[in-house]
Image (spheres, rainbow, N blue to C red):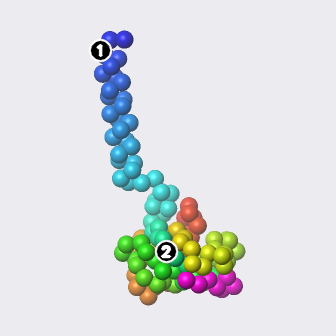
Amino acid sequence: MGLSHRNNRKRHTWKVSLLAIILSMVGLNPAAADENLQLAGYVESIDMKDGIIVVDVRTAGCEGIKTFVFEPKDDLFDRKDIGRKVEFFINSTDCTKKKVYTIKREGDSQ
């Protein structure tokens, strides 16, 4: 094990470190590839029958009380979620005031 082995090991370590930095900057979120926006906030109310949820969104760029729709059969939310912090994805890359977005399960492509 000479100098060349040490140099190869250093190059490998450097490449792995660089790859980790790039991946952390880009993110490996599967929803990002589908151009979905991840949001977080506190549930104000839920209408399980009609699939309507009101969330006090705390994510930067989308803050405020917002109404979203979801598919009740997907079991994304429960009445117990009222007052709790939730994280979810919407079918958009941005958040516009007064627009109602559809909440998606992580990894959904549409």
**Mark 1: few/some/many CA within 10 Å (<14, 14-19, 20+):** few
- On the image, numbered disc 1 is attached to which residue? 3
Residue at 50% from the left image edge and 57% from the top image edge: 30
Name the mark nearer the viewer: 2 or 1. 2
The relative height of residue 59 versus residue 66 in the rendered view (above or below) is above
Identify which residue, 46 or 83, lies in the foreground. 83
Counting from the top left corner in percent of width and height, residue 57 is at 46, 77
Residue at 57% from the left image edge and 74% from the top image edge: 84
Q: Amino acid at mark 2?
A: Gly
On residue 100, the disc is none
Labels 2 and 1 touching (C-beta < 8 A): no
Counting from the top left corner in percent of width and height, residue 49 is at 69, 85
* Quadrant position of the N terminus in the picture: top left
The relative height of residue 11 versus residue 31 in the rendered view (above or below) is above
In the image, 3: left or right of 47? left
As helix, strand or loop, the secondary structure at mark 1 comes to helix
Residue at 34% from the left image edge and 23% from the top image edge: 8
Q: Amino acid at mark 1?
A: Leu
Q: Would you say residue 45 sits in the magenta stretch?
A: yes
Counting from the top left corner in percent of width and height, residue 19 is at 37, 41
**Mark 2: few/some/many CA within 10 Å (<14, 14-19, 20+):** many
In the image, 57: left or right of 6? right
In the image, 92: left or right of 10? right
Counting from the top left corner in percent of width and height, residue 23 is at 39, 48
Magenta-drawn segment:
44-50
Q: Would you say residue 28 sits in the magenta stretch?
A: no
Q: Of label 2 and label 1, which has the lower sequence position?
A: 1
Task: Please give the count of numbered marks on the rendered protein.
Answer: 2
The relative height of residue 52 versus residue 23 in the rendered view (above or below) is below
On residue 41, the disc is 2
